[in-house]
Image (tube, grey):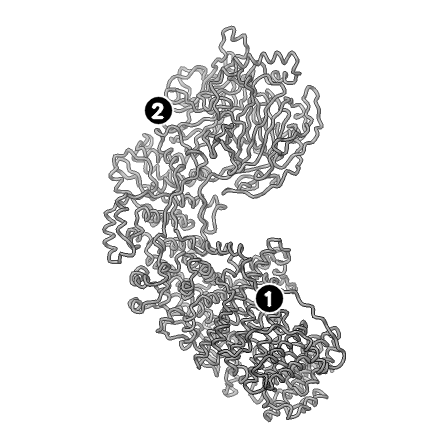
């Protein structure tokens, strides 16, 4: 077998060749006449018609033939890559492309990226000395820089390069030279000039030609130049305006098909939210007698939930502040803020800004106190109130009481609100609520003075500027309540757009007074809800006159004002240097969970007292105030409570508001506390302490000696609660009892719910005080399971194991805690994801020690790690990419997982070793040196421990990648299933650790075999083997993601590990997959997995050096073990080059090729095998792998040099052989075009000239459509149009990029049959990429089978159901989708055209521009491909002319030129095509003038058709070629009768068949030919000019017939009469008469006049029989016209052509294939069909009387049976009619 595949081996029955056929395939019509006995012939015919069983066919369950299956299962083992490089190092050093033949030395890099901070300095607690291990770990996580490892040259990967190329192409499309096509130009108007006389006279023809203008002449056409010089000129001409990159013009692949794309996560940053900036411009009451304090918070009314902390502000004048200065220690600048920024993560239509007002406490409830504000300023009550306010501020200035409130719906502000007059007025003492007129705004924004009631109740939209729906950031901020994660919504359309709205100034003229008995948040929510709809309740609301003016504007991160402060009062960037008031960020309490890991340090606690009941307390306790303190060790208060406006930043105590004379007060206060560090420190005993005071409001009480405040109760709440033995930060609602007396010492060790002895409690120790505690911490998780794990880790780090756990149980407790992590609440788990993962990795890599005993939890830690990965990925499935990679987990691997640096001594020692100076023999020495280095690798360092086993821990430190791989090998059960589902995480984690290990230890300079330990390599080998088993034995759908992850792992390992080892893994994978695939009935899923695998591997940025792209060393290859795998070669051994030549190993998929060029060899071998599988989607997928690679190479700037392109193309040369091998499977674009209608007629009307002779209409049909073995029993699947187009594009790239000398050497060794296949591919490619105008582009399938399937699904949905699903499945199983894209419904014949519906929607402007650009690129692509084909054809012609044995293929080469001329081309291409055609005619005149006339006839037809082109340049070139053709013919024999006859016939055919022939342009071309004849000085003295003139005038006379025929287009009878007279005028020219008879026959057939059509065919047959009778008197042939007398009464007219007029020996006369026996039979057969169609059955009998003797002569019994059967049916019909 010579180590090669062959076509005969691919088909098991290929040995059964029909009689007369040799082993090598031959042209279909080149079979010799069968001389077997008639009985043998009958048996053969009978055998061909009977179907064979499956067993007879040798069909197995697999779609592969046995031989192909055996070859596919046998994968060639790759060479030892590293050893190969070492052996060829000297060759590489001398190679001019040596920089591309090896991996760059600086390929891997690890760099540090500083974390982007919003603040001036990192946010850290004040006390850094007493941090707990948890806080230290969290701070290090939040404030550390990012260590990023990456491959420098990854930017040259296919996705990156192609994306960049596509972007540049779109930007520079105007710079691409345009190609001019006639189909793009508007149709020219051809005026009709009618002459109703007989044929125009010779003189009138002369006059018309003389008056016509000629086109420009081709310069230098008549110069006598040597053929080589002329070819050199033409070659230089072809290189002008060429496109260097073919695939830059080709449509890009869909992004979803680019499975090799791996997106790098963005740098971590705080989640992006909507932000609004609120500036309080004014807060003023109409009556200003005392200080007023305001606060703003954000609420969601529907959810009844607070969404932010309070922002405090005031506009008190200096005089007002002076009234309370005795109670304010000092004022910090941060408390002067009057602007704030609110964050809104989840915008809704129910967001409300709630503004609350407070005043200094005074005697009387809110209703009594507010009465004075309704009085006139000059009244006595006001004067008295001013005096009382002064007294109250001096005495009670530190106490507040609630006063008023108002609310603003943000949706009304953002969307615009029109002021509507109120229907209510002031009555019963109410202030007027009529809307005030709008005021002007200095800022130019929309100023709306609105009554709050009307603002809330009547929200009508008004135009407020353009709003954008774009969002920024990583999290979607348009989540509405319809999201399944967040609940449901009744109105999703009302969600306002906070991204872009105009700055709005809202002015509110009144405030609602607080109702004394309705002060809770629930009451306020009810009020706000009622305000949106008219109700009696809202009419009773009291309004305090005043003015609140707010400016509300959107605020992006880039537009943050200078001088902002975080909620912790840390300065933000940019810093304000002008001393302006600060702007505060208001901390958001998101409506729903935000699933993003914490980004920065934050440790706050919010306390909200709710209610208190002192009814049962003895004594006076009515005006109750709560003092809140955070106490530490020794009950000392800590200054950590945030102050309000115009006061200190931090307080050690804060007071609640007071309700006058209320023993059951409800509180609305918020206390914000900055938590201290190390809350778990029991010595500190941090707790909240609440003191309840009775405040005396009467001044006389103070005069009587009573204190202002009297304590009436005490209670406390420890910050750390114990839950099941685990400590947690308090969170949620608490109900506490109140102690009457001050608690005793050490009370904090006991919960207040425990009744201490000898203590007194209010109401018998009942819980009478309720409060809510809300921690906002990035240190404390708030989840019991997470807290338990964190606490256990802290215990181990500090070596302090609690007594209730014990050292003996710590390991089991820690294991249980690790396994419980996956069941923790999703929100806390994700927010602390990075911290948790860091701790788990630390436990895997460095298990802790306690007193010298290791706590062995590595296995549990690994299981917990993969379980968390599974939980996070499953829960956040919307945040996964194409490969199932979760963005949060990926971000951790890329930026947070950092390997600790190695000792300096290790780095210095490693610097002595370099890759290029080490051989394999030195690896052992290097390994020995490595053993002396400290194996000190871990994840990012943690706090030191107090363990005494430091030495033991140091020796146990392990390398992270080794331990992860080791634990993975030991993993089993559920966790292992998780690793298969989310294998990417472990793979990328190992790669990250490996990369950092190599860079930090400087081991990148080591030989690859010495970089990692043997233990690690063994673990990887074990894992790879098990993974391959999983992939092979699991359903493809379940293992797809893992298969992709494994491919990416191998892909990454090629940059880090020993490449020989990775190649062995790939080899093992492919061998197992192939072995399994050949046993399956449906191998498509498994082969699809392998294609994904190979595509990812081939996307390596260093694919070129990985495939060892340089000449093979014969001696070295002989030393390697022989490959057991045969090669994919040509049809037979004789058709290929020498099997021992080095070139063969390069151009065929031989064993040596696959060993050296391993990855590309695998890909090409897979493509070859997939062509055996009947699945169109798989074909496209396989071809797209190659297409993706070649597109990438075409755009890669590293390979811009021609030498590099040559080397790249050399790697893909076997693809040409694969295409030649599977030529019968390619889609027939030529046949498809013929079905749609070609724009050019075939030579001499195909229905007469070519088809009559039995010759195929195109060389594409010659001997290549036998898609199977000789018996036709096992057909290969045919590729669809899309797959064929992609494949041919790849073919053309290789031909364009390959070295000319390589192609010449290969093609010189090809046999004629193989060369003919190559030329046929060129011809098919020409038609495939033919440009027919923009309107045809959308019908071509460039975007993959997915879009076709989408069309089918769309059609199914529109037609009402999915009833066509089975049909779609059948079409998929058949290998291609229906070419018509149609569905038949219910057997009624209804056809639904999805492709038409798909195009009915009008294009947008963007789509229109895209379509225009696509048309430009398609036109340039078509031109470039045709010019490349011309280059190749010229090279093939040179090869043929140098080898006498290949001379028969000259005609095939010329057919490629003829076919290109028949297609729509650009002007530039036509110029080069005509030049190439003239060169071939000049060098090989015998091709046209000494052989059969089909080439000459076809060429004349093409030239004449282009002579009527609407483009002058095309006409000029066509005229030049036609003139040179005449001249060449004349110089051979002093006459050009052959060309003269064929030109005349061609023009007659054009005139009779093309309706839009432009005779003006054609007349101009005839004048141009006359001009050439007049200027040809060489032949001026000969008869040639006169003969040309005669021919041109004759052609002009024929052209005049065109004018008359056009005049009669609407009168068929007159048109037929004219055509009959024209045909009769050619009685002396049989060829022309036959042409016009054929034209008449076609026209009559189109009109359904079959009787008349039959008569035309009978006359044509009679004319041919006259010629045959004159040529050779054969008894079985008719005697001429006499034999047809029974069919036509005037048939003897054809015999008027005498012997002297129809000489069979005259050149150019009756020499076409129509004047043959086959032509006669074809004419008679068509005549019989016409008679039968006309129901003239007697005529059928007369026809077959002439045909039967001819058939009997050749013993064609099969044909005789058909004839007699047809006669039988005809006679029955005659009887029936009688």
Checking the image for residue 95, the label placed there is none
Between residue 227 and residue 1306, name the one nearer to us.
Answer: 227
In the rendered picture of this protein, how many numbered marks are placed on residues? 2
Above or below — where is 224 with respect to 835? below
Residue 1031's spot in the image, x, y percent? 41, 56
Q: CB of mark 2 within 8 Å of CB of mark 1?
A: no
User: In screen coordinates, is 674 left or right of 957?
Assistant: right
Between residue 1055 and residue 835, name the one nearer to us.
Answer: 1055
Task: Pick out the residue farthest to the right.
Answer: 196
Residue 299's spot in the image, x, y percent? 56, 31
Mark 2 to mark 1: distance in Å? 90 Å
Task: Pick out the residue farthest to the top.
Answer: 704
Dividing the image into 4 quarters, which one contains the C terminus? Answer: bottom right
Dividing the image into 4 quarters, which one contains the N terminus? Answer: bottom left
2 or 1: mark nearer the eye = 1
Is residue 290 something one can see in this rendering?
yes
Q: Provide the residue designation for mark 2.
A: 683
Above or below — where is 1014 with respect to 59? above
Q: Give the residue at x 25% y 39%.
A: 952
Q: Provide the residue designation for mark 1.
A: 181
Q: Which of marks 2 and 1 is nearer the N terminus?
A: 1
Residue 551's spot in the image, x, y percent? 59, 31
Residue 1052's spot in the image, x, y percent? 38, 53
Above or below — where is 329 with respect to 302? above
Q: Give the residue at x 60% y 38%.
A: 501
């Amino acid at each position: 077998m010579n180590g090669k595949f062959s076509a005969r081996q691919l088909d098991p029955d290929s040995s059964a060749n029909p009689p007369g056929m040799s082993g090598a395939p031959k042209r279909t019509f080149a079979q010799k006449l069968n001389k077997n006995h008639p009985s043998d012939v009958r048996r053969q015919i009978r055998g061909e018609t009977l179907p064979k069983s499956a067993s007879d066919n040798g069909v197995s369950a697999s779609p592969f033939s046995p031989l192909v299956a055996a070859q596919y299962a046998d994968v060639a083992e790759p060479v030892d890559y590293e050893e190969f490089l070492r052996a060829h190092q000297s060759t590489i050093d001398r190679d001019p492309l040596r920089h591309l033949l090896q991996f760059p030395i600086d390929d891997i890099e690890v760099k540090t990226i500083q974390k982007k901070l919003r603040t001036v300095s990192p946010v850290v607690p004040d006390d850094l000395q007493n941090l707990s291990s948890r806080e230290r770990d969290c701070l290090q996580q939040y404030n550390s820089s990012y260590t990023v490892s990456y491959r420098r040259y990854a930017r040259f990967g296919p996705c990156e390069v192609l994306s960049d190329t596509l972007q540049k192409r779109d930007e520079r499309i105007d710079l691409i030279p345009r190609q001019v096509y006639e189909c793009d130009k508007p149709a020219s108007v051809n005026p009709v000039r009618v002459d109703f006389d007989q044929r125009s006279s010779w003189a009138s023809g002369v006059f018309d030609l003389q008056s016509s203008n000629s086109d420009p002449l081709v310069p230098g056409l008549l110069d006598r130049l040597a053929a080589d010089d002329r070819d050199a000129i033409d070659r230089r001409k072809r290189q002008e305006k060429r496109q260097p990159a073919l695939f830059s013009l080709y449509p890009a692949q869909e992004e979803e098909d680019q499975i090799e794309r791996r997106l790098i996560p963005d740098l971590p940053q705080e989640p992006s939210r909507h932000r609004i900036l609120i500036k309080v411009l004014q807060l003023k009451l109409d009556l200003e007698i005392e200080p007023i304090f305001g606060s703003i918070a954000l609420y969601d009314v529907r959810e009844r939930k607070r969404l932010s902390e309070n922002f405090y502000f005031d506009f008190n004048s200096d005089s007002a502040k002076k009234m309370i200065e005795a109670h304010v220690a000092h004022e910090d600048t941060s408390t002067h803020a009057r602007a704030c920024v609110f964050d809104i993560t989840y915008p809704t239509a129910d967001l409300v800004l709630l503004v609350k007002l407070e005043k200094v406490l005074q005697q009387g409830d809110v209703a009594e106190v507010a009465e004075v504000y309704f009085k006139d300023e000059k009244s006595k009550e006001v004067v008295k109130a001013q005096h009382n306010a002064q007294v109250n501020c001096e005495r009670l200035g530190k106490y507040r009481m609630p006063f008023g409130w108002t609310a603003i719906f943000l949706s009304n502000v953002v969307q615009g609100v029109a002021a509507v007059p109120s229907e209510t007025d002031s009555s019963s003492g109410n202030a007027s609520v009529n809307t005030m007129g709008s005021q002007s705004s200095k800022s130019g924004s929309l100023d709306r003075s609105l009554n709050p009631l009307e603002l809330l109740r009547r929200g009508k939209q008004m135009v407020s500027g353009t709003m954008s729906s774009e969002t920024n950031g990583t999290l979607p901020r348009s989540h509405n309540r319809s999201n399944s994660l967040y609940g449901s919504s009744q109105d999703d359309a009302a969600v306002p757009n906070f991204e872009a709205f105009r700055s709005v100034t809202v002015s509110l003229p009144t405030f609602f007074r607080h109702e004394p008995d309705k002060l809770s948040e629930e009451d306020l929510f009810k009020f706000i809800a009622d305000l949106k709809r008219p109700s009696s309740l809202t009419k009773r609301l009291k309004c305090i006159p005043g003015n609140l003016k707010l400016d509300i504007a959107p605020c992006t991160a880039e537009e943050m004002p200078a001088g902002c402060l975080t909620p912790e009062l840390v300065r933000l960037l940019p810093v304000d240097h002008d001393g302006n008031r600060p702007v505060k960020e208001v901390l958001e309490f998101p409506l729903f969970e935000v699933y993003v890991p914490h980004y920065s340090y934050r440790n706050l606690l919010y306390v909200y007292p709710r209610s208190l009941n002192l009814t049962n307390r003895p004594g006076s306790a009515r005006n109750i105030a709560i003092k809140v303190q955070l106490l530490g060790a020794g009950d000392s208060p800590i200054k950590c409570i945030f102050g309000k406006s115009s006061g200190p930043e931090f307080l050690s105590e804060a007071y609640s508001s007071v309700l006058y004379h209320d023993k059951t007060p409800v509180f609305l206060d918020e206390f914000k506390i900055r938590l201290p560090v190390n809350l778990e420190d029991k010595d500190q005993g941090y707790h909240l302490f609440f003191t309840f005071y009775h405040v005396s409001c009467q001044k006389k009480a103070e005069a009587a000696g009573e204190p202002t405040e009297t304590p009436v109760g005490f209670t406390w709440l420890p910050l750390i609660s114990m839950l099941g033995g685990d400590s947690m930060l308090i969170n949620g609602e608490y109900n506490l009892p109140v102690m009457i007396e001050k608690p005793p010492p050490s009370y904090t060790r006991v919960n207040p719910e425990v009744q201490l002895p000898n203590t007194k409690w209010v109401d018998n120790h009942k819980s009478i005080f309720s409060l809510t505690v809300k921690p906002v911490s990035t240190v404390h998780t708030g989840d019991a399971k997470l807290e338990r794990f964190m606490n256990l880790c802290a215990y181990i780090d500090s070596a302090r194991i609690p007594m209730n756990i014990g050292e003996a149980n710590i390991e089991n407790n820690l294991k249980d805690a690790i396994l419980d992590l996956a069941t923790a609440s999703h929100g806390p788990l994700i927010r602390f994801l990075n911290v948790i993962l860091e701790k788990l990795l630390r436990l895997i890599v460095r298990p802790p020690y306690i007193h010298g005993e290791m706590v062995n939890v590595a296995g549990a830690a690994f299981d917990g790690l993969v379980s968390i990965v599974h939980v996070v990925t499953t829960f956040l499935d919307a945040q996964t990419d194409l490969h199932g990679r979760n963005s949060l987990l990926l971000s951790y691997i890329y930026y947070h997982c950092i390997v600790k640096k190695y000792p300096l001594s290790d780095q210095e020692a490693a610097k002595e070793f370099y890759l290029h100076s080490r051989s394999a023999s030195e690896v052992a020495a290097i390994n020995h040196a490595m053993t002396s280095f400290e194996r000190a690798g871990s994840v990012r360092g943690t706090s030191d421990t107090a363990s005494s086993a430091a030495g033991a821990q140091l020796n146990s430190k392990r390398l992270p990648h080794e331990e992860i791989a080791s634990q993975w090998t030991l993993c089993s059960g559920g966790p292992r299933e998780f690793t298969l589902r989310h294998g990417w995480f472990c793979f990328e984690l190992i790669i990250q650790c490996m990369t950092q290990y190599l860079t930090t230890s400087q081991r990148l300079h080591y030989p690859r075999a010495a970089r990692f330990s043997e233990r690690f390599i063994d673990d990887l080998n074990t894992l790879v083997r098990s993974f391959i088993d999983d992939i092979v034995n699991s359903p493809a759908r379940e293992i797809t993601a893992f298969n992709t992850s494994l491919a990416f792992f191998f892909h990454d390992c090629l940059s880090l590990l020993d490449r020989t080892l990775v190649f062995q893994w790939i080899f093992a994978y492919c061998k197992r997959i192939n072995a399994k695939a050949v046993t399956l009935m449906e191998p498509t899923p498994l082969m699809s997995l392998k294609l994904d695998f190979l595509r990812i591997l081939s996307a390596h940025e260093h694919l070129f050096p990985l495939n060892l792209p340089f000449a093979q060393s014969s001696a070295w290859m002989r030393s390697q073990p022989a490959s057991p795998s045969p090669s994919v070669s040509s049809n037979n051994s004789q058709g290929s080059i020498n099997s021992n030549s080095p070139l063969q190993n390069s151009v065929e998929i031989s064993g040596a090729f696959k060993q050296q060029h391993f990855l590309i060899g695998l890909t090409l071998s897979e493509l070859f095998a997939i062509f055996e599988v009947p699945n169109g989607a798989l074909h496209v997928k396989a071809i797209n792998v190659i297409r993706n690679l070649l597109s990438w190479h075409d755009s890669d700037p590293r390979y811009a040099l021609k030498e590099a392109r040559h080397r790249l193309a050399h790697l893909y040369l076997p693809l040409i052989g694969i295409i030649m091998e599977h030529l019968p499977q390619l889609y027939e674009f030529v046949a498809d075009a013929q079905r749609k209608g070609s724009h050019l007629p075939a030579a001499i009307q195909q229905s007469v000239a070519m088809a009559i002779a039995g010759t195929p209409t195109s060389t594409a049909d010659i001997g290549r459509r036998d898609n199977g073995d000789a018996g036709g029993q096992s057909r290969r699947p045919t590729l669809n149009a899309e797959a064929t187009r992609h494949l041919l594009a790849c073919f053309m790239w290789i031909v364009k990029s390959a070295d000319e000398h390589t192609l010449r050497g290969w093609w010189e060794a090809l046999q004629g049959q193989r060369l003919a296949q190559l030329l046929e591919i060129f011809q098919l490619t020409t038609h495939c990429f033919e440009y027919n105008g923009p309107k045809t582009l959308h019908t071509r399938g460039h975007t993959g089978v997915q879009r076709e399937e989408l069309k089918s699904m769309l059609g199914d949905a529109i037609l009402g159901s999915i009833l066509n699903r089975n049909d779609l499945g059948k079409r998929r199983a058949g290998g291609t989708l229906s070419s018509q894209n149609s569905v038949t419904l219910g057997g009624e014949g209804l056809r639904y055209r999805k492709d038409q519906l798909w195009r009915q929607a009008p294009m947008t402007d963007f789509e229109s521009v895209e379509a225009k650009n696509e048309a430009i690129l398609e036109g340039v692509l078509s031109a470039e491909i045709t010019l490349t084909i011309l280059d190749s054809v010229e090279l093939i012609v040179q090869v043929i002319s140098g080898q006498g044995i290949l001379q028969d293929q000259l005609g095939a080469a010329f057919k490629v030129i003829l076919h290109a001329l028949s297609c729509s081309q650009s002007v530039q291409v036509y110029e080069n095509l005509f030049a190439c055609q003239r060169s071939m005619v000049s060098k090989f005149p015998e091709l046209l003038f000494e052989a059969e006339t089909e080439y000459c006839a076809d060429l004349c037809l093409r030239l004449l058709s282009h002579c009527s082109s609407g483009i002058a340049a095309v006409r000029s070139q066509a005229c030049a070629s036609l003139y040179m053709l005449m001249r060449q013919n004349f110089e051979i024999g002093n006459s050009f009768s052959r060309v003269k006859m064929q030109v005349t016939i061609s023009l007659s055919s054009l005139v009779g068949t093309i309706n839009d022939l432009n005779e003006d342009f054609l007349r101009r071309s005839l004048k141009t030919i006359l001009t050439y004849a007049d200027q040809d000085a060489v032949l001026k003295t000969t008869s040639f000019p006169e003969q040309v003139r005669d021919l041109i005038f004759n052609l002009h006379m024929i052209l005049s017939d065109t004018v008359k025929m056009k005049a009669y287009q609407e009168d068929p009878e007159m048109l037929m009469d004219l055509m009959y007279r024209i045909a009769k005028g050619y009685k002396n020219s049989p060829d022309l008469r036959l042409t016009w008879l054929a034209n008449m026959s076609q026209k009559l057939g189109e009109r359904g006049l079959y009787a008349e059509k039959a008569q035309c065919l009978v006359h044509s047959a009679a004319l041919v029989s006259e010629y045959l009778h004159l040529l050779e008197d054969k008894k079985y042939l008719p005697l001429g016209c006499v034999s047809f007398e029974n069919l036509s009464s005037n048939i003897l007219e054809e015999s008027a052509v005498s012997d002297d007029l129809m000489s069979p020996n005259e050149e150019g006369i009756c020499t076409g294939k129509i004047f043959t026996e086959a032509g006669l039979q074809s004419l008679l057969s068509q005549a019989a069909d016409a008679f039968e169609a006309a129901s003239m059955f007697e005529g059928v009998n007369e026809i077959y009387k002439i045909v039967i003797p001819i058939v009997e002569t050749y013993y064609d019994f099969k044909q005789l049976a058909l004839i007699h059967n047809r006669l039988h049916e005809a006679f029955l019909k005659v009887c029936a009619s009688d």
